[in-house]
């Protein structure tokens, strides 16, 4: 193997440019804590509504769901450590409202990011309420 100097590589156009930085290199999921709390409340509300509607008849299923919810919020907290990054702090509400957040597709405003994150938990909670309403004795 022989050594080729930098000038010779540059002259032969064999040096590639460094890749552009992606907007979502930060894997800390740094949304404000209030958004995570709202999401957790909606998911727990889903399980609670179903547990009340069916009189706790599916206790094992609810336990499994709570275990999955714990993993859902716990595993992402491990990502920054596994990637070798220092743990970054979550955004404060003021920063979140003023600057929004960077996503893979670009900057998103605080309102849009909040809707994007909370729409699915809200719809899941609405589904539980609909199922409980349908299952309620007439």
Image: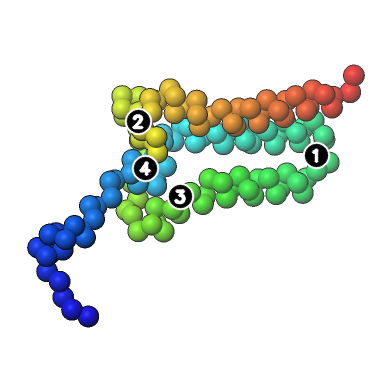
Q: Which mark is residue 6?
A: none
In this rendering, is residue 136 above or below 90? above
Q: CA distance from mark 3 to mark 4?
A: 16 Å
Chain-order first, disc 3 or disc 4: 4
List x then y, in percent, for residue 108.
38, 28
Residue at 89 percent of width and 23 percent of height: 137
Chain-order first, disc 3 or disc 2: 3
Chain-order first, disc 1 or disc 3: 1
Q: Residues within 10 Å of mark 2 (few under 14, many from 20)?
A: few
Give the residue number, with chain letter if any, for mark 3.
77
Give the residue number, with chain letter if any, for mark 1.
56
Q: In the displayed image of the protein, which residue is found farthest to the left?
A: 7
Chain-order first, disc 1 or disc 2: 1
Q: Residues within 10 Å of mark 1 (few under 14, many from 20)?
A: few
Where is the C terminus found, in terms of image quarters? top right
CB atoms of marks 3 and 4 within 8 Å: no
Q: CA distance from mark 1 to mark 4?
A: 42 Å
Residue at 62 percent of width and 35 percent of height: 43
Q: Residues within 10 Å of mark 4 (few under 14, many from 20)?
A: some
Image quadrant in which you'd find residue 133: top right
Q: Residues within 10 Å of mark 3 (few under 14, many from 20)?
A: some
Give the residue number, with chain letter if any, for mark 4.
24
Q: Which mark is residue 107?
A: 2
Q: CA distance from mark 1 to mark 2?
A: 44 Å
């Amino acid at each position: 193997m022989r050594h080729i100097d930098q000038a010779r590589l540059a002259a032969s156009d064999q040096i590639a440019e460094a890749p552009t930085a992606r907007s979502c290199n930060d894997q800390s999921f740094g949304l404000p804590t209030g958004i995570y709390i709202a999401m957790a409340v909606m998911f727990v509300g889903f399980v609670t509504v179903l547990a009340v509607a069916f009189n706790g008849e599916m206790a094992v299923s609810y336990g499994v769901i709570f275990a999955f919810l714990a993993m859902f919020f716990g595993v992402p907290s491990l990502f920054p450590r596994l990637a070798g990054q220092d743990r970054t702090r979550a955004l404060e509400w003021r920063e979140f409202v003023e600057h929004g957040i960077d996503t893979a597709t670009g900057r998103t405003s605080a309102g849009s990011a909040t809707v994007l994150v909370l729409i699915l938990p809200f719809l899941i909670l609405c589904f539980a309420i609909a199922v409980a309403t349908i299952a309620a004795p007439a």
